[in-house]
Amino acid sequence: MSNRRMDKAETEAIRDVLAGNRDAYRVLMDRHFCSVTRVAFRITGNEADAEEAAQEAFLRAYNKLPSFRQDSAFSTWIMRIVMNTAINLVERRNRDLSYHAPRIADEPSANDHTVRIADGKAGPEGVLLNREAVSLRHAAMAELTPMERTAFTLRHMEDVSMTEIAAALNVTSNSAKQAVFRAVSKLRRSLTPVAGGAR
Amino acid sequence: MKHFSEEDLIAYQLHESSDEAVIARHLESCSECADLSESIAETLRVFSGDPVPQPNLEHNWQRLRGNLSVLTPEHRRGFEPFRWHWAWPVAGVVTAALVLLTGFGLHIHQTSGTRHSVAVNGHGPLTTEPADSAIANHLEAAERLLTEVNNSSGSLDDTTREQAHDLLLKNAIYVRDARDSGDLAEAAVLENFGRVLTTLDNEPQTSHSTWRLRLEMNTSGLLLDIRILRQNDDHSQGATQ
């Protein structure tokens, strides 16, 4: 997530969209959809929700484009939107007890909407260990609040600065930092069997 | 020897610490902190290798495109004197009308007796009934409880549930009093509060019950109503003093 000013192609694309050319939005989507989906995946934890959040974020950004002041980069703006969209989606999913998103399980089952993470390179023992590790990681991440999960994944996995995370989450830099620290502490305790855990 | 906290060591591992050099030196000589630091590093390594699936761009674009409307630029909102040439006469007429209405309103206020307003969530006092200190205390307790309900993330603790039980008994009396005195607005708000209390007192507490209560009974709206009642209470107490 860079804070650079927008380049000419993006500025022109926005101008064309505002002049009534919907297809010009494709330029912005080509450039940023993958990174936006990546961030959404870190927050939601599954592919289907990540794409839904990314779609929603791009649609919101499109509808707000007339009021977008180009004093910050489109990439920064869309990242803020997708973070909030993804957090809202996670909260909605948590509230909606009837929702069954694909979950990771040792044995995939269509009835239970569970899937298995494939690892073509590992041997039988590796597959077993890998399954257990994935399952534990998934469970540990599920223990985090959406805010902790977002702050942690963006800081640690996507190398986003605390200042940018704080701005996107609309909290102080110190709150964002505390959310990351709490997340790491919780994860360490959850992962006792895998990572050595709390000592 | 001064040891570093887990938080200090997490900050160190994430390169967010301002004492990085000091911590690094300490870790060389303190095995306890070194073990904790290594455990944090190991946790971070476990969560660093998750692969991210690549989205199908074309498919997503086609889905999105169907939802895009044709846009037009937002009009400038700056001060444009030539486009506002009609505004001054209109502003003059509106001001004159306001002055007349205020004078007329004051005249009616002085000539008529005390009237009861029954607006809920509106501006100004709901009622001009003089308030007693008991209902004031009850409303204050109600506000505290609803604030707790609106802000807690899991199930409510035992103390809060006991408070709900106590308030439930008193609330029924205040509902009856409000009805008897003809203050239907206050009675309606307190009745709604009574429903929340009954639910809290009878339903089993689960991790989702507080959230469901907030959603189903609109406790935020109720909290606002209670605050307005309290505000009215303060106003009328001020007026009687």
Image (tube, coloured by chain):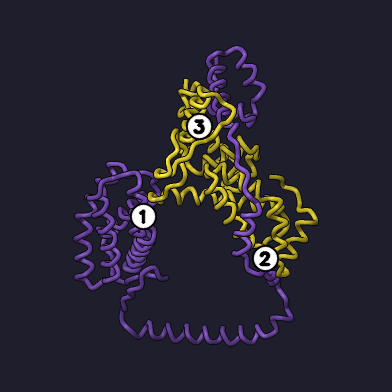
Chain colours: A yellow, B purple
Task: Please name the residue shown 37% across and 51% down the image.
Answer: B211
Q: Distance between the residues labelled 3 and 1?
A: 35 Å
Categorize mark 1 by other alpha carbons within 10 Å: few (<14), some (14-19), many (20+): some
On the image, numbered disc 1 is attached to which residue?
B214
Q: In this view, does A132 lie to the left or right of A82?
A: left
How many residues crowd around disc 3 within 10 Å: few (fewer than 14), some, or many (20 or more)?
Answer: many
B146 in relation to B102, above or below: above
The image quadrant that residue B93 belongs to is bottom right
Which labelled disc corresponds to residue A134?
3
Numbered disc in front, either 3 or 1: 3
* Residue B9 x %, y %: 57, 25
Circles 3 and 2: CB atoms closer than 8 Å: no
Instruction: Tell me which label, 3 or 2, sits earlier in the chain.
Output: 2
Q: In which quarter of the image is residue B135?
A: bottom left
Q: In this view, does A35 lie to the left or right of B120?
A: right
Give SS at disc 1. helix
Residue A66 is labelled as 2
Judge whether A188 appears above or below A7 on screen.
above
Q: Residue at x 33, y 84 (%)?
A: B112
Q: Residue at x 62, y 55 (%)?
A: B59
Q: Which chain carries label 2?
A: A
Q: Is residue B44 left or right of residue A5?
A: left
The nearer-to-camera label among 2 and 1 is 2
